[in-house]
Image (spheres, grey):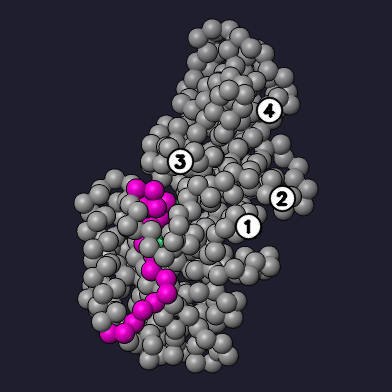
Amino acid sequence: MTDLRPTWVDVDLDAIAHNVRALSFAGSELMAVVKADAYGHGDVPVARAALDAGATWLGVALVEEGLALRSAGIEAPVLVLSECPPGSEMLAVSAGLTATVYSSAGLDRLAAIAATARDRVGVHVKVDTGMHRVGVWPPEDVPAFVDRVVEAGLELDGVWTHLACADSDDVGTNGQLDVFADTIDRLAAEGHRPRLLHAANTAATIRHPRARLDLVRVGIGLYGIEPAPGVGADLGLVPALTWRSLVASVRRLRAGSRVSYGHHYEFERDAWAATVPLGYADGYPRTLSSRADVLIDGRRCRVAGSVTMDQLIVDCGDRPPTPGDEVVLLGAQGDEAVSAWELANQSGTIAYEIVARIGARVPRRSFGGGGPS
Ligand SMILES: *Cc1c(COP(=O)(O)O)cnc(C)c1O
């Protein structure tokens, strides 16, 4: 469909490629984590750009997300990071997605499918080493679990874990990595040597070289966003996403005028106000009301009053904007930039949530990466 609305997201695939290279380290393959529509960036173009730049794996949260990559013709290995929900195993296996297993029931369901499959069915076993979300727990149970995997006719291609505090707590992270190393030693003692051991998200890839192992699972860094403010600041990651709109209407308001629902924002002086056609239904947080800046003509303008469902108003001060002027909500314009962390700090969240929640009704346009996709 042609995109009719003048609000969209631009994604720079050359930035994605640059970030893949910046996060590639000798000896470790790179999995581009493209779950949640590539953190709001558009999964298929991002996946292609990351693979072209040297990523060897893709990571998704849902079977549906893996199937969408396959439908687009992407043939690279895809790891489903959560266990396949009941009933989804056949689709996952026949699409050649690699399943993660960690529960007894999940293993049984996958084994039943594998028994009917023509090809070998490789799996990755996830170990809970301290995040305490999912994974085989306690880690001492991993050898027995792996024995069951192999007895069921599944191939153990990988063993992995996930780190809870890789951006902050070195002692805790090293503790988790020690538990993981012990687990791998126990498996080796029983003759199990999976080809791929992995533990690192972006923060661990940057801050904990010992976590890189055979493969790193890079999400947020792929998009040029630091996993926590300052982490990886020296790597030169390039933000890939710019969220744009166009000024819809302009009015001159008198000092004392109040705008938007609740009239919470008062213009202290005579000023120009511009209306921008996007709102919280597009994922622009309502908690940014009267707090965030947008960029118009390379300058910051404060969001004036409540962000509404489909529109917001900005205070342009003495500078009259013109309908059709470009507005940048997130990203750079001229010498100014609004980062995902800036919006996250102003709205009480993390940069991941800012980009991942940009709504499905905001069209994504990608450029670079050897051509439009
Ligand atoms: C989302 C996810 C990642 C990527 O994390 P980033 O912090 O975005 O790099 C890695 N591993 C798992 C299991 C994940 O769910």
Q: Ligand 1 is located in which of the four quadrants? A: bottom left
As measured in the structure, the alpha-carbon distance from the residue carrying label 3 to the one carrying label 2 is 24 Å
Pointer 2 or 4: first along the chain: 4
**Position of residue 248 measured from the top left corner of the image (x, y, whole percent):** 70, 27
Q: In which quarter of the image is residue 321?
A: top right
- Could one spot residue 273 in this view of the protein? yes
Q: Name the residue under label 2.
A: 370
Which label sits on residue 342?
none
CB within 8 Å, label 4 to label 3: no
Pointer 2 or 1: first along the chain: 1
As measured in the structure, the alpha-carbon distance from the residue carrying label 4 to the one carrying label 3 is 30 Å
Secondary structure under the numbered disc 3 in the rendered image: helix
Pointer 4 or 3: first along the chain: 3
Q: What residue span does the magenta drawing correspond to?
A: 190-207
In front of the other: 153 or 290 = 153
Q: Name the residue under label 1.
A: 52
Residue 195 covered by magenta stretch: yes
CB within 8 Å, label 2 to label 1: yes
User: Is 326 on the left or on the right of 37, as rendered?
Assistant: right
Amino acid type for the residue under numbered disc 4: Glu
Q: Name the residue under label 4.
A: 326
